[in-house]
Amino acid sequence: MPGRILRVPLLRKVAEAWPWWLLLLALAGVRLSKGAGFMDAYALLSRPFWPGSAQSEWLRSAQQLQEQASLQQLQRDNQRLRGMLELNRSGGGRVPAPVISREAGGWWQQLELGKGSVDGIKAGDPVLAPGGLIGRVSSVTPSTARVQLLTDSGSRLGVWVARVQRHGLLVGQGTARPRLQFLEKDTGVRPGDVITTSPASTLVPPNLLVGVVQSVNENLAPAPDAAVQLSAPVDAVDWVQVVTR
């Protein structure tokens, strides 16, 4: 009888502790399943809050925008690589060269090339980029060359406006757009006119594309001048072609 009396309270205590046994079994299940049950329960409870038709449309629009931006970037890269390929076809006294250095403080003044006198480059040689003339070589070392850009404040270049048969002087301003100065009062130049190197030029090859007139200041004395947008992307050029003489 005493042994039976002791077993009854023990069984009763075990029965009263069933919530704890259930909790231990649940924790063991979570441990063995790595939380899969909780993830399923969370997914079931959160299903009413999943994106509806409006949210899905926003997601589709965002995806389309990303795809469009990627396509535009690929097109820009393709155009850039085509331009580099054209510049890399050296021949006829033209030397392709990479831009290896450029100072932020002199972005519109000069750049450094990765080729120099060993490659036949000399001071004064014209420098072309995809789109047209961007400057002239100002100094060289055996392996590098420094280019003075047309946008440099010390740059001066005789140019030609074919439509009105007028000569002018392209003067750098240290900014993205140089100024075109004229000698005559009545030039007839207007926005959209194409600027090339002078047909009579001896410093650079004649008839090279330089840029386009953006605006004309007719009120300037003694002669008008014009703002010019260069046809070559001076701010983003990374390969050039040096015209050796």
Image (cartoon, rainbow, N blue to C red):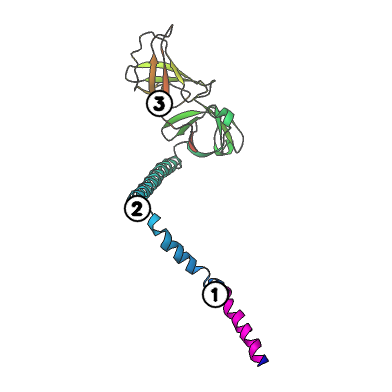
The three-letter code of the residue at mark 3 reads: Gly
The x, y position of residue 113, in whole percent, is 55, 36
Q: Residue at x 38, y 47 (%)?
A: 62
**Residues at marks 2 and 3, CA–CA distance in whole angstroms:** 53 Å
Q: Residue at x 35, y 52 (%)?
A: 52
- Mark 3, residues whose alpha carbon is within 10 Å: few (<14), some, or many (≥20)? many
Magenta span of residues: 3-20
Q: Residue at x 59, y 81 (%)?
A: 12
Looking at the picture, tell me which residue is in the foreground, 169 or 71.
71
**Cα distance between the residues tagged 3 and 1:** 83 Å
Q: Position of 68 compared to 98: left or right?
A: left
Mark found first going from the N terminus, 1 or 2: 1
Disc 3 + disc 1, Cβ < 8 Å: no
Q: Position of residue 56 (x, y in %)?
A: 35, 51
- Label 1 vs label 2: CA separation? 38 Å
Which residue sits furthest right? 2
Magenta stretch: dominant SS?
Answer: helix
Q: Position of residue 60 (x, y in %)?
A: 35, 50
Across and down, in percent, residue 109 comes to 54, 26
Q: Are marks 2 and 3 in contact (CB under 8 Å)?
A: no
* Image quarter of residue 5: bottom right
Mark number for residue 211?
Answer: 3
